[in-house]
Amino acid sequence: MDYNELLNKAKSASEHAYAPYSKFKVGACVLTEDDKTYCGCNFENSSFGLTICAERNAIGSAIVYGARKIKAVAIYSPNTKLCYPCGACRQVLCEFSDNNNMDIVLECDEGICVQNLNELLPKGFIL
Ligand code: THU
């Protein structure tokens, strides 16, 4: 699948983010090994620590439909800086990757930037 399309889905998802506390909206869209896509957005809570990131929400959406292997994830936030996945999300992405190999698709000024999970989380924990 074209990563532009994946990023567009992440953009649409970011519009539904529930971020009244940080005002930092994020959308994510995962691409599974059988080329299906599942989206998520962040949703915060008055008890701040209960916040769920967009990436983990997207993974949950994929898991509930039986997906287990994710090839790529697009992450979009309508802010000036690129929205790299937080440490916790990197580990959760690792769990559903093929040996820590997954494209992380972000949008930057020059266009789309793609990095691999194994660069962002070297030696991710796998049982
Ligand atoms: N956030 C994400 O959704 N994904 C990330 O990888 C980084 C942070 C959210 C959590 C919180 O709602 C807001 O961004 C500010 O931290």
Image (spheres, rainbow, N blue to C red):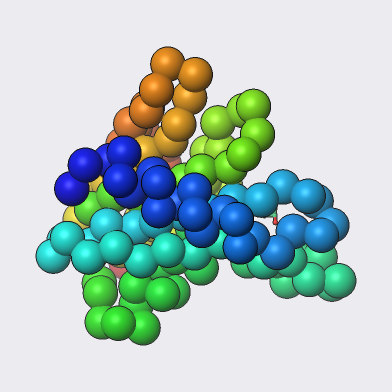
Q: Residue at x 78, y 71 (%)?
A: 45
Examine the image and state in which quarter residue 43 appears.
bottom right
- Going 84% across and 57% down the picture, which residue do you hit? 21
Q: Quadrant of the C terminus?
A: bottom left
**Residue 101 position (above or below residue 13):** above
Q: Nearer the viewer, residue 82 or 68?
A: 82
Above or below: residue 101 compared with residue 28 = above
- Classify residue 49 by image quadrant: bottom right
Question: Could you say where residue 75 lies in the image, as x and y percent from the top left?
Answer: 47, 46
> Which of these two is toward me, 2 or 100?
2
Write down the quadrant of residue 52 in the picture. Answer: bottom right
Residue 118 falls left or right of residue 83? left
- Decide if residue 112 is on the left or right side of residue 23: left
Residue projecting furthest to the left: 34
Number of numbered discs on residues:
0
Residue 123 visible to an observer of this rendering = no
> Which residue sits at x=18%, y=48%?
1
Identity of the residue drawn at 33% across and 48% down: 6
- Residue 70 location, x and y as percent? 26, 59
Q: Quick check: 65 left or right of 13?
A: left
Q: Picture coordinates of residue 50 (x, y %)?
A: 73, 71
Q: Is residue 72 visible?
A: yes
